[in-house]
Image (cartoon, grey):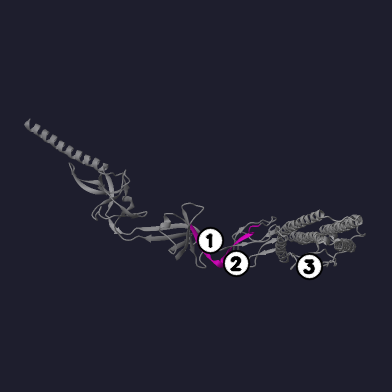
Amino acid sequence: MYLKNKRLIGKLAALFFVGMVLFTLLSRAVYQNGVAVVSTAAPAGGTVAHTVTATGKIVQNQVLAVNTVAGLRVGSILVNEGQEVAQGDVLLTLDQEYLEEVILTQKQEMEKQKMNVQDAQSRNYASQKQRENAQAQAEENYDSAVAQAQTNLDRAQRDLERAEAALEDYYNGESSGQAEEEALAQACQEAEAAYNQAAAELEALEGEIEARIQEAIAQAEAEANEPTQPETTTPAETTAPAEPTQTTEPTEPGIVDPAEPIEPQELSVVGEALPRMLGLSQQERDAIAQQIREEYAQQLAQAQQKAELAKQAMDQAQADMDGFYQQQSQGDAASEEELLQAVENAQEAYEDALTALENAKTVYSRAVSSANLPSSSDHSAQIGQITYEQMELELEKLEALLEAEGKVLSPVDGIVTGCNVQTGGKTSDTAAMLLADLNQGLKFSCLITREQSEYIGVGDKVTLQASATGREYSDLAVTTLSSEEETEGFYRMMVQLPADTMTLGASAELTFTRKSQPYRCCVPLSALHLDSQNRTYVLVVDQVESVLGTQDQARKVIVTVLEQNETTAALDEGALTSEDQVIVGSDRPVDVGSRVRVG
């Protein structure tokens, strides 16, 4: 019985120890299953390489615009976009019938413009003549008014001297009758001579006006009866009104440059010569006469005024003479009081005449100054001439197109990159077609990000790989790098291509790698983490003792990143050693203090 119990106890003990072993193995399996398996790497020296890749297209260095005259109808288009053309190839043709209509219209418009220029030249000439006549008339009015006032002053001075002489004769006891009679007679003769001269000048001026009217009417009738007007006609010599002396005749630039200026009155009266069967009507004759009389109006008024003043002076001298004879017939002798009064009156008349002379000089000098003021500029004739010349250049282009049978040719060897016209449509002010000039070479164009632009610049040597053929082209220099206005945050990069490399419009991929300076502490980028305070740290594997024995545990180490790329980070020395095992990967999330197992 004892043995039997002992065997039972032995079996139970064996079962207990077997169970303990099984439970230990099971607990170890459960423990191992809950621990993260990590991969580690030791910090090592190295460099951080930055690789820039971008995809772009092959574009032209220079685009030429093929232009033609706007507003023409397109007959046919002989090329397509992307087609390669040689210099002299026909790109498109214009509708010749429509082109001929446009040329005819252009010539008619030029003829109208030519007439407008001639009209503007005539207006400018007439305005200049009127201004000169006004200046001359103002100066003549000044001379006439000052001369008349001076004559009145001289007469007043003579009357004053005569009155003073009569008073002195009275005091000397001498008779002044004979001397006064001689003075009055002389005054009458001078006044009558002045009147006769003024009347003769007035009569001569009126005759001149009538002669001008008859001559202008005859000239107008002769030109009106001619079947056609010659291209160049010299106006008949006519007697013109007195005009101021000019050093140069006013001229205006224009299309027609006649040997002598065209008189305004001849232009307005005669007009353009048209075939007519009869002479001038009475209304036209009256218009001619009225216009010429208006031209002489100021001069005629001045002559009439001069004659009127001369007649008044003659009448006054005759009245003075008659008064003297009347006094002599009555036998009245002038008393001392009357002689004194006569001297006083003569003195007042002299002072009034002197004042009138000064006033005449002041008033008429202002009129002369006003007439000599510069007039406003009128450049209508010059502007019209410029417009005519522009129309003339346009006509030359149209006629050249017509001579070329409406064909628009390629100016260079190139590729058609754009067509802005369509068959049956009209040409516009923009280019009809755009050509890539193959003679100027090709270039690679692509966009890179702002971050990529920090690692590549002008002059860097890049590699291009053609997408279609896979062929690589190395050591190609970056020629330009500029910000892209249309896409914010990107930069446009250009790489000049050697001749006979890739074709226009082909795609290619750019590759460029820039290495940093050597660093002593580099780790894979996957080892970096950020804590809640935005500090960069890595996890390293440490061995710690526990009830279960020696275990691996993750420890946090704060680091400073000096430079990094997509795969590697360079760290500041001191935080890590070359013996540290930095966790760079795990099969599950790992945090500070987590148990880990290096796999």
- Real-space CA distance between mark 2 and mark 1, rounded to the nearest whole angstrom: 15 Å
Tag in front: 3 or 2: 3
Residue 65, quarter of the rendered image? bottom right
Specify start and end residues of the magenta stretch as a single range. 429-446
Tag in front: 1 or 3: 3
Is residue 543 placed above or below 396 in the rendered structure? above
Residue nearer the viewer, 9 or 144: 144
Image x and y of residue 306, in percent: 83, 59
**Marking on residue 413:** 2
Image x and y of residue 280, in percent: 91, 58
**Marking on residue 59:** 1
Residue 212, quarter of the rendered image? bottom right
Residue nearer the viewer, 181 or 121: 181
Of the image marks 2 and 1, the number of the one nearer the N terminus = 1
Q: Is residue 402 left or right of residue 567?
A: right
Q: Give amino acid for label 1.
A: Val
